[in-house]
């Protein structure tokens, strides 16, 4: 156990060996090594690729959300026009077909 100075360059005080064996909750318990998580799993000791793994997960989420958004744009239809314009009508494929007065109402706002 080390106490670090504000610059993080070197330890100020190192705990004695007797105290180190008491602190920390004991040894690490066995865990399945095949479980993959982007942040390291049970004992997060910053795995060597944690930033890359985080970027891979973020890219995966971005791709999934983009695909769902594109599907929503293609499929959104309104049987009854809303009382006032809503933001999704700006990018909806069929907004002008479903509500012919949409452009006039957007210009009035």
Image (cartoon, grey):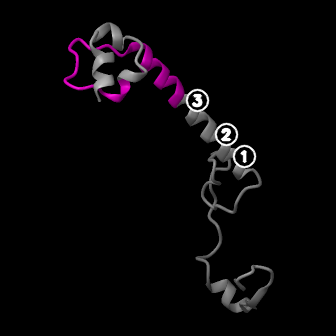
- Residue for badge 1: 52
Q: Is residue 22 left or right of residue 97?
A: right
Residue most extreme to the front: 108
Placement of the C terminus among the 4 image quadrants: top left
Label 1 crowding class (10 Å Cα cut-off): few <14, some 14-19, many 20+? few
Looking at the image, do the residues carrying marks 1 and 2 touch, with CB atoms under 8 Å apart?
yes
The residue sitting at 36% across, 21% down in the picture is: 89
Q: Nearer the viewer, residue 27 or 83?
A: 83
The residue sitting at 65% across, 72% down in the picture is: 27
Counting residues from the start of the chain, the first of labels 2 and 3 encountered is 2
How far, Cα to Cα, is label 1 from label 2? 6 Å
Q: How many marks?
A: 3
Give the answer, above or below, for where 22 lies relative to 42: below
- Residue for badge 3: 63
Give the answer, above or below, for where 72 lies relative to 34: above
Q: Is residue 37 left or right of residue 79?
A: right
How far, Cα to Cα, is label 3 from label 1? 16 Å
Q: Nearer the viewer, residue 31 or 69?
A: 69
Magenta-colored span: 65-88
List x then y, in percent, for residue 82.
Answer: 22, 21
- Residue for badge 2: 56
Label 2 crowding class (10 Å Cα cut-off): few <14, some 14-19, many 20+? few
How far, Cα to Cα, is label 2 from label 3? 11 Å
Placement of the N terminus among the 4 image quadrants: bottom right
Judging from the image, what secondary structure is the residue with disc 3 in?
Answer: helix
Counting residues from the start of the chain, the first of labels 3 and 1 encountered is 1
């Amino acid at each position: 156990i080390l106490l670090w100075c504000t610059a993080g360059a070197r330890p100020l005080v190192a705990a004695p060996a007797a105290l180190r064996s008491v602190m920390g909750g004991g040894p690490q318990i066995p865990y399945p090594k095949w479980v993959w998580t982007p942040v390291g799993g049970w004992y997060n000791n910053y795995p060597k690729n944690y930033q890359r793994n985080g970027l891979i997960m973020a890219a995966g989420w971005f791709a999934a959300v983009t695909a769902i958004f594109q599907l929503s744009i293609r499929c959104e239809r309104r049987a009854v026009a809303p009382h006032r314009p809503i933001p999704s009508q700006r990018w909806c494929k069929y907004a002008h077909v479903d509500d012919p007065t949409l452009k006039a109402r957007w210009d009035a706002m």
